[in-house]
Amino acid sequence: MTAPVTARQYGVLAYPLILSSILTPLLSVTDTIVIGQTGDAAAIGGIALGAVFFNTIYWLFGFLKVSTTGFSAQASVHHDETSLQFALYRPVLLGLVIGLILIVCRAPLASAGLYLLAAPASLLSDVNTYIDYRIYGAPFVLIGYAVLGWLIGQGQVKQALMIQIVSNIINIVLDVIFVVGLDYGVAGVAAATLIAEVCTVFLALSFIVRQLIWKPTYRHLLFRLQDYRQFFSVNADLFIRTIFLLLVTGWFTRTGASFGPDILAANAILLQMQYVIAY
């Protein structure tokens, strides 16, 4: 008979997981804080809107982390090595494909997002600059979700937390260098976040590379469509729920825009606080 989990054992896993989740939206929060030191209201509003744009998109694909955690945990408990490997490989491939699609569709996505958010003309230049830089981090962000979920599912929560702490430190340091030191403004903030997102994936891979196994038979299994159908069917309800949540935040931001750019920027900052609470 399996011994019951103690409160201490539960806490050892839960508290780092909570901190790890809170750190997820902090890259965008850091961008807003650093650019705020310049006193440029247009830049603050532009980055705040851009952060809402990316937080919204990435929240929509948060199932890559959640479901990967579940599949990884199940495979780990059952000591199923093949399932454990594919609990990572499949969502990583999905994250790469989805991320590349987001890059290719950058123009219509940005147009639709800025229309729905009712971005004022005075902020469009800064918002578009921010999006133009950060969109190239999309594959890395989504792959990072899969890798972090895989680690968490195996109980390697401290490693996941360490990866995100280092990523945020890199972002903060580069933000200060690019914005305060070199005066690159919005482009500097976006570039700093992009670099931090790329570093997150490579750092995460350095943690797990020795745990990865590849066999010739895996190639066929990696592209088996029924496994992906199962993956999406498991996440369908979560995906639909997320869409409705995002409709609420989108409506809130768009309504705030009708009161002018200052209210819009302030509401966008409030939404970032809400993202931290939600995560």
Image (spheres, rainbow, N blue to C red):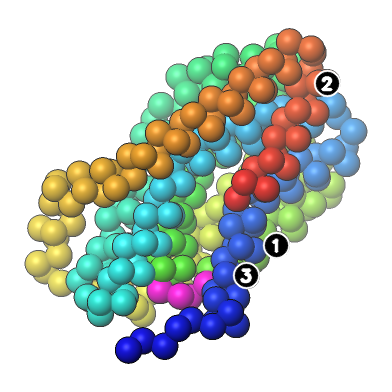
Amino acid type shown at disc 2: Asp
Identify the residue position indicated by label 1 in the image: 169
At 53% from the left and 25% from the top, the residue drawn is 247
Q: CA distance from mark 1 to mark 2?
A: 29 Å
Identify the residue position indicated by label 3 in the image: 15
For label 3, the crowd category at 10 Å Cα-Cα, with few meaning under 14, some 14 to 19 and many 20 or more, is some
Amino acid type shown at disc 1: Ile
Label 1 sits on a secondary structure element that is helix
Q: Earlier in the sequence, mark 1 or mark 2?
A: 1
Decide: is 177 above or below 37. below
Quick check: 266 left or right of 106?
right
Q: Which mark is residue 262?
A: 2
Range of magenta residues = 154-158
At 67% from the left and 48% from the top, the residue drawn is 277
Along the viewing direction, whichever of 158 and 34 lies nearer the viewer? 158
At 51% from the left and 41% from the top, the residue drawn is 59
Does residue 129 appear in the picture of this structure?
no
